Amino acid sequence: RQRTSFGVHQGLECKTIAVIGATGGVGLETVYQALAAGNKVRALCRSPDKLVIPPGSGGESKAGTTLTSPDLEIIQGDVTKKADVEKLLDDSDIAGVVVALGGRTAEVGKTMLTDGTKNVIETMKDKGLSKVAVVTSIGSGDSY
């Protein structure tokens, strides 16, 4: 098997990764790196205009520019609305889910993490999905 410049094996089918909280620091890196690795990404974003190339792996010269790819599907929505989570996960090719929720409580609400996570887990169970990675900054620094 040959490797491309992004480390993807040629001739292998790429996977779809669902990312929730795609416009935060961890979410942006997750989306960018998943696309660079040859995966397809479905991203749930409250504000799709904030889905930009991250300064870390994207490099300072491209940082902040709109992130586009034929392998990127943006779903505008809110993790606290189960219908939005269902729409995100309504794809039989999803291999796993990354939950990268965070933010200041004053901006996202006191129950965003608990309500949103409940919606994600319930919807994953309904869809038969079992692979999830959860990363959050809630409860650290000035997030509360």
Image (cartoon, rainbow, N blue to C red):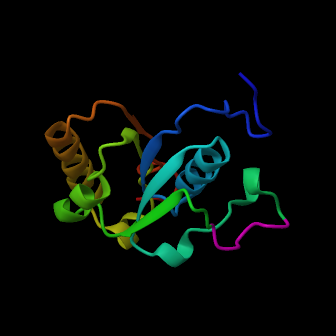
Is residue 130 located in the magenta-colored stretch of the structure? Answer: no
Which image quarter holds the N terminus? top right
Q: In the rendered view, does 51 fall on the left or right side of 61?
A: left
User: Which stretch appears magenta?
Assistant: 61-67
Among the 4 quarters of the image, the one containing residue 110: bottom left
- Lateral position of residue 132 relative to residue 22, left or right: left
- Percent position of residue 32, x then y: 63, 53
Percent x, y for residue 126? 14, 41
Whether residue 120 appears in this view of the structure is yes
Q: Residue at x 70, y 73 (%)?
A: 65
**Left or right side of 123 for 106:** right
Q: Nearer the viewer, residue 120 or 37?
A: 37
Residue visible at 26% across and 57% down?
85
Question: Farthest residue toward the front?
Answer: 11
The answer to whether one can see residue 111 in this image is no
The picture quadrant where one finds residue 42 is bottom left
Residue positioned 40% across, 59% down in the render:
144
In the foreground, 64 or 105? 64
Q: Position of residue 25 (x, y in %)?
A: 58, 56
